[in-house]
Amino acid sequence: MEQLVAGIHHFQRHVLPAQRERFASLARGQNPLALFVTCSDSRIVPNLITHTEPGDLFLLRNVGNLVPAYHAHQADTSAAAAVEFAVAVLEVPAIVVCGHSKCGAIDALLHPEKVAGHPSVSGWLQHAEATRRIVQEKYAHLSDEQRRNVAVQENVLAQLENLRTHPAVAAALARGRLTLHGWVYKFETCEVFTYSPDVEQFVAVNGDVAPALATTFGARTIQSI
């Protein structure tokens, strides 16, 4: 706690004076660039990864970067409310679902015995059951580490499909004012990969590759990234 309090003092004394005008404008309202759905993992810092400022990202964070399908929203009205508010009220032009390597939630999804004594975690991960079954049926031949790697990617795509079941998202997509993007952040190299429907792969985001619009999902071959 001492480090957190010291951080507040540093912000107020050294950061705020140079940014006072920006923070004053944020007090009048927000106009975020995207709804950014990612994991609660402390190693993920969305604004740092994307080099964005306060007010640029509307964040939805939870264990495993999950977005329950709309028909299941009664089990988690918080996620549904965040999606609806971002899309219907703030009218964000994009939604990014960002998974990450070495994800503990994905590991627990593939090995449920690891969270057998944690009913809340086990119950929450049921929203990723589609991911678990895809990995079980399609990637059983891979090693455990490889299956976790592809599960991270498949889970991002599964959450994008879940997003399309939300009425606000479906309506915005139909009007052509919203795009959906699937990303994976790799801790080992600090790279970001985006799903490209053209090649049905996650490809590295660099100066030559723009984030791909993820609107349709056909047969795909997920590889290690």
Image (cartoon, helix red, strand yellow):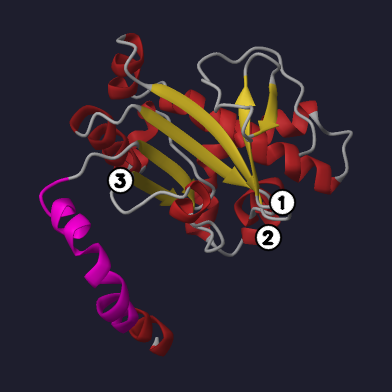
Amino acid at circle 1: His
> Which is in the foreground here, disc 2 or disc 3?
3
Answer with left or right where residue 23 lies relative to residue 177: left
Instruction: Please provide percent x and percent y for residue 72.
Output: 39, 32
The mark that comes first in sequence, 1 or 3, is 3
- Residue 114 is tagged as 2
Quarter occupied by residue 222: top right
- Residue 78 is tagged as 3
Q: Which residue is drawn at 50% across and 28% down?
A: 181
Amino acid at circle 3: Ser
Q: Residue at x 42, y 27 (%)?
A: 163
- Image quadrant containing the N terminus: bottom left
> Which is in the foreground here, disc 1 or disc 3?
3
Q: Give the range drawn in magenta.
A: 8-29
Instruction: Please provide percent x and percent y for residue 190.
Output: 66, 52
- Image quadrant containing the C terminus: top right
Q: In the picture shown, does residue 155 fall above or below 21?
A: above
Q: Is residue 11 magenta?
A: yes
Q: What element carries label 2?
A: helix
Estimate the spatial distance between the alpha carbons at disc 2 and disc 3, rounded to whole Å: 26 Å
Estimate the spatial distance between the alpha carbons at disc 1 and disc 3, rounded to whole Å: 26 Å
Answer with left or right where residue 189 lies relative to residue 76: right
Quarter occupied by residue 15: bottom left
Q: Could you say which is closer to the camera, residue 42 or residue 190?
A: 190
Q: Is mark 1 on a helix, strand or loop?
A: loop
Instruction: Please provide percent x and percent y for residue 90.
Output: 21, 34
Q: Which residue is identified by label 1? A: 111
Q: In the picture shown, does residue 187 fall above or below 203?
A: below
Labels 1 & 2 near each other (Cβ < 8 A): yes
Q: Neighbour class for label 1 at 10 Å: few (<14), some, many (≥20)?
A: few
